[in-house]
Amino acid sequence: MPKCIYCGKTYEFPRGLTLVARDGSVKYLCSPKCQKNMRMKRRKVEWIRKAKRSKEELKEEIKEEVEEETEGKK
């Protein structure tokens, strides 16, 4: 499974884009979003990783709040 050079995600092959440079190095991009950001020469951005973490953290916080509410009602 190839790994995107921009966001670091692994994805199923034949999705995405495979770039082969003149020097023979192979680069994989998983989505059009990563392709566009690479073409605009943007650096790796932290918000990609933060968004993933924040969703997981939000789910955990919601679970904790629900548990506290159920304990308080008992």
Image (cartoon, rainbow, N blue to C red):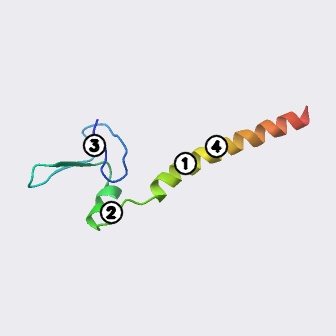
Quadrant of the image for the N terminus? top left
Query: Could you say which disc has been placed on residue 44 in the image?
Result: none
Determine whether 34 is above or below 68 in the image. below
Where disc 2 sits, the SS reads helix
Distance from the alpha carbon under mark 4 to that under mark 3: 29 Å
Label drawn at residue 15: 3
Disc 1 marks a residue whose amino acid type is: Arg
Q: Along the polypeptide, which appears first: circle 2 or circle 1?
A: 2
The label shown at residue 37 is 2
Q: Is residue 43 left or right of residue 13?
A: right
Q: Which of the two discs, 1 and 4, labels the residue nearer the N terminus?
A: 1
Secondary structure beneath disc 1? helix
* Mark 1 or 4: the one toward you: 1
Instruction: From the top left corner, tell me how far across and down residue 68 is, in percent.
Output: 82, 39
Amino acid type, mark 3: Arg
Which residue matches tag 4? Answer: 59
Q: CA distance from mark 1 to mark 3?
A: 24 Å
Q: Pick out the residue farthest to the bottom.
A: 40
The Cα–Cα distance between marks 1 and 4, rounded to whole angstroms, is: 10 Å
Q: Nearer the viewer, mark 1 or mark 3?
A: 1
Image coords of residue 23 (percent x, y): 9, 53
* First in sequence: mark 2 vs mark 3: 3
